[in-house]
Image: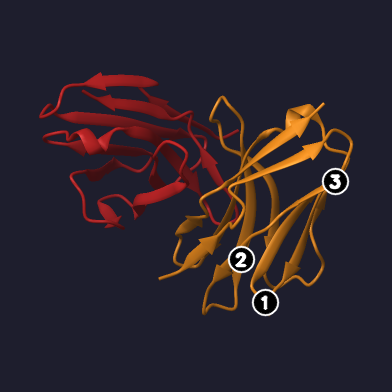
């Protein structure tokens, strides 16, 4: 079975500092997508960033960037200049041609003022 | 633009009662549809997904079932709820590169 693993249940970061959330996954496919979703207290799932596996260049979205290591099956999220509004649960997810989106167990990010 | 509606937002049901959660998508056709459950402090567990009308794939054996009577309608049901069915249920749709989620339903079985 395909799995997505987030080994950090909780992380803390000082406001304006940088934090990296880890994610590893298991797959035998060569073509797939990876995602980071944010779930604030409202519980609405919000897409933060997306990476296509066939692209070698790491995706970036403003203060959010990823480190995609395909051979190692690793997909970490870096948040720069952390803001109080970044506090949330962050979920790593993988999707492929089987149409299934598989999520990790999440990392709760706390931002300290 | 595409929107997804999920209701009700909260639901309290007694053990043994039936369940029906509804999800509809607007602004797109033939989407892939999903039901996820999120237990307290846990990740999202994929329950069902559908790639077309009447086509339902179940990911885990459980007390729940799903149906897709129309292209953009996805229903999660149970004939008799168990205490363990309590949780936060999320409906989502996708056309490949991104999944879009509804607001969720918090179900409490008492």
- Residue at image coords 78%, 72%: A56
Structural crowding at the residue carrying mark 2, measured as other residues with C-alpha within 10 Å and reported as few (<14), some (14–19) or many (≥20): many
Front residue (pair A70, B75): A70
**In this rendering, position of residue B102 left or right of residue A13:** left
Residue designated by label 1? A72
Q: Which residue was labeled with disc 3?
A: A18
Q: Quadrant of residue A94?
A: bottom right
Residue B94's disc is none
Q: Residue at x 51, y 50 (%)?
A: A105
- The one nearer the camera, B93 or A74, is A74
Q: Element under label 3?
A: loop
Supply the letter of whichever chain is red. Answer: B
Residue behind mark 2: A24
Q: CA distance from mark 1 to mark 3?
A: 23 Å
Residue at the spot 52% in from the left edge and 79% down from the top edge: A28
Which image quadrant for residue B71? top left
């Amino acid at each position: 079975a395909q799995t997505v693993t987030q080994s950090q249940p909780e992380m803390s970061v000082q406001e304006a500092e940088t934090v990296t959330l880890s994610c590893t996954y298991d797959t035998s496919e060569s073509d797939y997508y990876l995602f980071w979703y944010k779930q604030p207290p409202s519980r609405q799932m919000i897409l933060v960033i997306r990476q296509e596996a066939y692209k070698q260049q790491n995706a970036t979205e403003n203060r959010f960037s990823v480190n995609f290591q395909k051979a190692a099956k690793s997909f970490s999220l870096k948040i720069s200049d952390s803001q109080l509004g970044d506090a949330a649960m962050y979920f790593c997810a993988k999707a492929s041609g089987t149409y299934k989106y598989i999520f990790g167990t999440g990392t709760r990010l706390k931002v300290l003022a | 633009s595409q929107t997804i509606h999920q209701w009700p937002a909260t639901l309290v049901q007694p053990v043994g009662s039936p369940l029906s959660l509804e999800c509809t998508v607007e602004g797109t056709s033939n989407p892939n549809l999903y039901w996820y459950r999120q237990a307290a402090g846990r990740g999202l567990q994929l329950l069902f997904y559908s790639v077309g009308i009447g086509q339902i794939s179940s990911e885990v054996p459980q007390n729940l079932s799903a149906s897709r009577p129309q292209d953009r309608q996805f229903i999660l049901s149970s004939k008799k709820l168990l205490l363990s069915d309590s949780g936060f249920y999320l409906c989502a749709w996708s056309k490949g590169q991104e999944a879009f989620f509804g607001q969720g339903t918090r179900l409490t079985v008492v």
